[in-house]
Amino acid sequence: STEAHSALVAAADLAKRSGASLHLVTAFPPSSMLTYAGLESVLAALEKDAQILLDAERVIVEALGATVSGLHAAPQPAFDAVPRVAQAIDADLVVVGNRELDVLKRLLDGSVSNDVLHSAHRPVLIVRGGAGCWHPAQVIGAVDDCPASKGASRFAGTNAHRSDAATLLIVEVDREPPMVAARYQVYDINVGHDHLEPLAASLEQSVGRAVAPALTVGEPAAALLAFGDERSGP
């Protein structure tokens, strides 16, 4: 799919720039299902097609300047195959595409990227936006007071550093105060966020470029998306 190709381009670029090993995974219908139906010949054909696909994708990766360390054709659903391979090779990062399904299709078919995100138990990069979405021109690291967010910001900084033209922002979202509280006190967005400037300074040292800290207000997910849209322009 187009989305899988975008993920492949991103994964190849990350592997090339970081020197990481790169493994490619594809999945096809479970063998037990086909064997039970007496369709062993169909299973063999599917497995052959999967291997042909992997070989073709390896050629693409090598043309992008990266090296493939392993090919994995798994006779099981993709949302099981990808985490299983990731665990087997102890992957540091899983890269998957996203088809941006509408609500009905998501309910009926599920989302492979969402399932992988919640079952891989390791960092997952979901690539979306179609052709040309990689390299990123702007990288936003969302931070709060949990240690995991600091790690995510360092990862964002590393990727911005490896994408020569990318700018890096770290953004913290403050929830809007309840209406009752807002009525009796002056709300200052800067209060309680003294750690943001030191974090930006530490990232600047590690990634070797300026890091812009920012604060915004609202429901975290929506506020971060709105902040990114605002910064990227029309």
Image: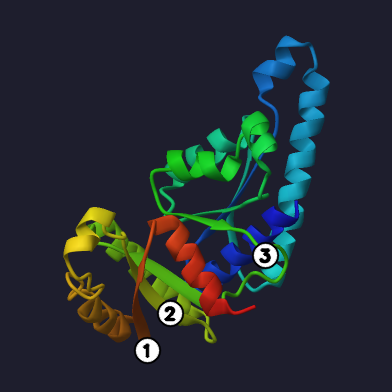
Find out whether the residues at labels 3 and 2 contact each other: C-beta distance under 8 Å. Answer: no
Residue name at image x 70 percent, y 71 percent: 132
Residue hosting label 1? 210
Amino acid at the residue labelled 1 = Ala
Label 2 packing within 10 angstroms: few (<14), some (14-19), many (20+) = many
121 or 132, nearer to the observer: 132
Q: Earlier in the sequence, mark 3 or mark 2?
A: 3
User: Is residue 5 visible in the rendered structure shown here?
Assistant: yes
Q: Earlier in the sequence, mark 3 or mark 1?
A: 3
Quarter location, residue 93:
bottom left
Find out whether the residues at labels 1 and 2 contact each other: C-beta distance under 8 Å. Answer: yes
Q: Is 39 left, or right, of 231 in this rendering?
A: right
Residue hosting label 2? 168
Q: CA distance from mark 1 to mark 2?
A: 8 Å
Q: Nearer the viewer, mark 3 or mark 2?
A: 2
Residue name at image x 61 percent, y 34 percent: 110
Q: Is 127 left, or right, of 131 in this rendering?
A: left
User: Is residue 19 visible in the rendered structure shown here?
Assistant: no
Q: CA distance from mark 3 to mark 1?
A: 31 Å
Disc 2 element? strand
Label 3 packing within 10 angstroms: few (<14), some (14-19), many (20+) = many
Q: Earlier in the sequence, mark 1 or mark 2?
A: 2
> x and y percent of residue 98 in the render?
63, 51
Label 1 packing within 10 angstroms: few (<14), some (14-19), many (20+) = some
Amino acid at the residue labelled 2 = Leu
Q: Which label was assigned to residue 61?
A: 3
197 or 216, nearer to the observer: 216
> x and y percent of residue 190 in the render?
23, 76
Disc 3 element? helix
Residue name at image x 38 percent, y 43 percent: 121
